[in-house]
Image: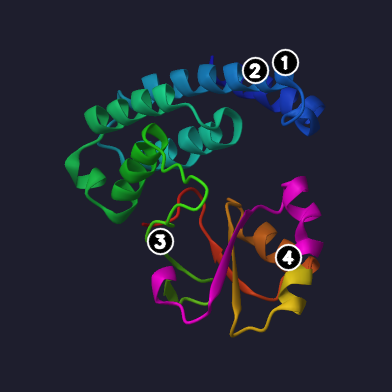
């Protein structure tokens, strides 16, 4: 039953979640538990494709679990994209959220990999105060993109370095843009205030708009 898989996933994460980025066995166990839960969810949702709740559950729960526990797996992303396109009606897939799901899975299948000295692709996103930013239009000489999350220990550990850069360079010379992948906006805001991250921020929840 799906409930059993979710219970197992929750127990594994409660007991060993701190090791997810350092212990291959834990990471593999969580990955497999996530896939098992997702498979059962997707089988059930396929029986109710015209129900908006099914669409929302796929977006929020299935893809949310995948982002957190599976990570980068182009083959799995291709399976989910095929399922998504075959299962849900055009009325859902053509919405803004629907297009974002499609684009996000496509990026996972064929991710943009930047090489050293390569040009940054054109990226735009909305800041937390509602302003739209296209990085190519910024006036500063340098732009530093920082991807982080309130639960990401390595991200938090590098904040003193970012603050040192902010103090060293003027605002006209360097623009720091932190993009959070937190799914909980309250945790994001809490973390930003707690660590005094006084620069430009965006909350992405799963894929920078390009």
Foreground of the two, 173 or 18:
173
- Separation of marks 2 and 4 at Cα, in angstroms: 33 Å
x, y percent for residue 112: 41, 43
Q: Which disc is residue 25 wearing?
A: 1
- Where on the picture, by quarter, is residue 128? bottom right
Name the element at disc 2.
helix
Q: Who comes first in sequence, dot 2 or dot 4?
A: 2
At label 2, counting other C-alpha atoms closer than 10 Å, the crowd grade (few under 14, some 14-19, many 20 or more) is some
Magenta region: 135-161
x, y percent for residue 42: 39, 24
Q: In which quarter of the image is the N terminus?
A: top right
At label 1, counting other C-alpha atoms closer than 10 Å, the crowd grade (few under 14, some 14-19, many 20 or more) is few
- Separation of marks 1 and 3 at Cα, in angstroms: 36 Å
- Separation of marks 4 and 1 at Cα, in angstroms: 33 Å
At label 3, counting other C-alpha atoms closer than 10 Å, the crowd grade (few under 14, some 14-19, many 20 or more) is few
Name the element at disc 4.
helix
x, y percent for residue 11: 74, 24
Q: How is the image coloured?
A: rainbow
Q: Which disc is residue 8 wearing?
A: none
Does 7 appear above or below 138? above
Name the element at disc 3.
loop
Does 193 appear above or below 39? below
Q: Mark 3 points at which residue?
A: 123
């Amino acid at each position: 039953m799906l409930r059993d898989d979710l219970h197992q996933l929750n127990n594994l994460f409660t007991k060993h979640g701190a090791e997810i980025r350092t212990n291959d066995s834990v990471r593999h166990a969580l990955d497999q538990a996530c896939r098992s839960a997702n498979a059962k969810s997707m089988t059930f949702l396929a029986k109710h494709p015209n129900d908006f709740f099914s669409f929302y559950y796929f977006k929020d729960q299935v893809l949310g679990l995948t982002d957190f526990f599976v990570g980068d797996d182009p083959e799995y992303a291709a399976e989910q994209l095929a399922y998504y396109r075959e299962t849900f009606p055009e009325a859902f897939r053509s919405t803004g959220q629907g297009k974002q799901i499609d684009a996000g899975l496509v990026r996972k299948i064929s991710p943009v990999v930047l090489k050293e000295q390569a040009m940054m692709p054109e990226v735009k996103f909305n800041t937390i105060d509602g302003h739209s930013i296209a990085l190519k239009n910024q006036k500063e000489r340098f732009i530093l993109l920082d991807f982080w999350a309130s639960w990401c220990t390595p991200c938090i550990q590098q904040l003193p370095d970012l603050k040192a850069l902010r103090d060293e360079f003027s605002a006209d010379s360097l623009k720091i843009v932190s993009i959070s992948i937190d799914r909980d906006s309250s945790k994001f805001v809490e973390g930003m205030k707690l660590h005094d991250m006084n620069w430009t921020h965006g909350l992405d929840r799963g894929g920078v708009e390009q």
